[in-house]
Image (cartoon, helix red, strand yellow):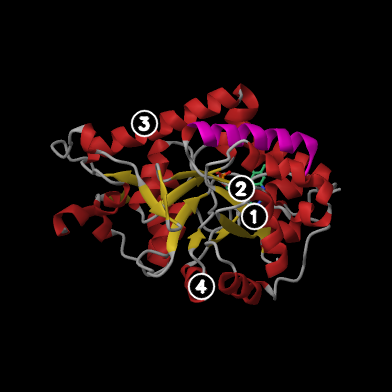
């Protein structure tokens, strides 16, 4: 069952990427153009500090898959592209491995293909410390991602219905593990209240995992014979809204993922406060349609284009994007009003610094 589910997820996610409406809330976030702001591109350096490690750029391949023969091959391609482009890579949920150690190879390939890179293990929020250690050991992982996916679970007929233990489990993992802990949503977003709770629980980084890209309510509903959960497809907060909501929270790094379509979306997410940006569905589609080499070139191309965007904006380091002027409009501005956030200061940040 698990094996089929992992293959189903890939199939539906690819279908969404190829056919879904490509607009999302990142379109409501525009950089104000200053025609004399540009710098010499030789001054731009994408090097990033995240999770206590040095990354070559503020980009990672987010957790997707493993647990079947076909998804093991996908992991091989993703990991090879991560190795060639230098970006960190996260595993898909490793619960299947905990249940059936014979599935280890489909996850371990992430480390085998990428022996010197940053590899991140992935489990759900019910994981015990012992289970987390087993997953981390299998990948010799540099960090652990815990995914929060209550909406996905309720749409799955076989999904969990008890989420009460999650906060205590997360706190225990944060206290016990020797490596950084990332907690992520899978596409419905983290509110500022949730990010506060994660910070207080000792979590290293919160990946807001917002709405706007791969939609697991739709994916799981498509797997139901009667498709009777269509009503929930639009649940949650988009990635830009989550970042605005959580702006200014200290003591935890903010990562951004969910609906990142381009190098410009990466720059927007960084300007909204993310330390690093994760991509899942887009990169999976490039791999499935064009192969490993094409994915490597796509990732290198994105980093080169981010470099150029920063040159035009006049910022030499990703963190400086947080000082750029942003014009917030449409649904994103409405979200700000509804949550008591004033969007106007974002439009004149440069003059204030
Ligand atoms: C995912 N995602 C995911 N996340 C996670 O934490 N554990 C998992 O096992 C999976 N599985 C999975 C399978 C497939 C096929 C996809 C495309 C995605 C969710 C992923 O990490 C991310 O949060 C969402 O996909 C939103 O990002 P994108 O796809 O819009 O870039």
Residue 153 found in image quarter:
bottom right
- Residue receiving disc 4: 202
Query: Residue 353, image x and y in percent?
Result: 16, 58
**Which mark, by number, is residue 63?**
2
Does label 2 or label 4 sit earlier along the sequence? 2
Identified at 63% across, 24% down, the residue is: 289
Q: CA distance from mark 3 to mark 1?
A: 29 Å
Magenta region, residue range: 67-84
Disc 4 under 8 Å from ligand 1? The reply is: no
> As drawn, is 109 to the left or to the right of 342?
right
Which mark lies nearer to you, 2 or 4?
A: 4
Does label 4 or label 3 sit earlier along the sequence? 4
Identified at 52% across, 62% down, the residue is: 180
**Which mark, by number, is residue 304?**
3
- Residue receiving disc 1: 122
For label 4, count other residues whose C-alpha is less than 10 Å away and answer few (under 14), some (14-19) or many (20+).
some
Q: Is residue 231 visible?
A: yes
Closer to us: 190 or 130: 130
For label 1, count other residues whose C-alpha is less than 10 Å away and answer few (under 14), some (14-19) or many (20+).
many
Disc 1 under 8 Å from ligand 1? The reply is: yes
Query: What secondary structure do most residues of the magenta stretch adopt?
Result: helix
Element on which disc 4 rests: loop
């Amino acid at each position: 069952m698990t094996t089929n589910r992992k293959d189903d997820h890939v199939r539906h996610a690819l279908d969404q990427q190829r056919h879904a409406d490509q607009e999302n809330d990142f379109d409501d976030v525009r950089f104000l153009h200053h025609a004399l702001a540009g710098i010499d591109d030789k001054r731009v350096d994408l090097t990033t500090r995240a999770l206590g490690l040095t990354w070559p750029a503020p980009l990672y391949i987010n957790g997707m898959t493993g647990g079947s023969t076909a998804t093991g091959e996908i992991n091989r391609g993703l990991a090879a592209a991560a190795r060639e482009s230098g970006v960190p890579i996260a595993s898909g949920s490793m619960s299947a491995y905990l249940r059936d150690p014979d599935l280890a190879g489909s996850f371990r390939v992430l480390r085998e293909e990428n022996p010197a890179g940053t590899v991140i293990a992935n489990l759900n929020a019910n994981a015990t410390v012992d289970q987390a250690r087993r997953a981390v050991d299998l990948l010799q992982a540099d960090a652990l991602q815990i995914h929060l996916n209550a909406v996905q679970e309720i749409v799955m007929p076989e999904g969990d219905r008890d989420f009460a233990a999650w906060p205590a489990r997360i706190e225990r993992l944060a206290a016990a593990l020797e490596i950084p802990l990332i907690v992520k949503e899978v596409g419905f977003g983290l509110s500022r209240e949730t990010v506060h709770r994660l910070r207080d629980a000792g979590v290293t980084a919160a990946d807001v995992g917002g709405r706007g890209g791969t939609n697991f309510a739709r994916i799981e509903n498509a797997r139901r014979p009667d498709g009777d959960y269509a009503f929930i497809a639009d649940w949650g907060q988009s990635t830009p809204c989550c970042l605005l909501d959580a702006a200014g929270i200290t003591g935890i790094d903010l990562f951004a993922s969910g609906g990142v379509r381009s190098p410009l979306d990466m720059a927007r997410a960084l300007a909204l406060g993310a330390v690093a940006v994760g991509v899942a569905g887009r990169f999976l589609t490039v791999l499935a349609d064009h192969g490993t080499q094409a994915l490597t070139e796509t990732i290198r191309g994105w980093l080169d284009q981010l470099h150029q965007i920063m040159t035009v904006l006049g910022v030499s380091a990703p963190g400086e994007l947080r000082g750029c002027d942003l014009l917030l409009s449409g649904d994103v501005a409405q979200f700000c009003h509804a949550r008591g956030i004033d969007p106007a200061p974002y439009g004149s940040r440069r003059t204030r610094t």
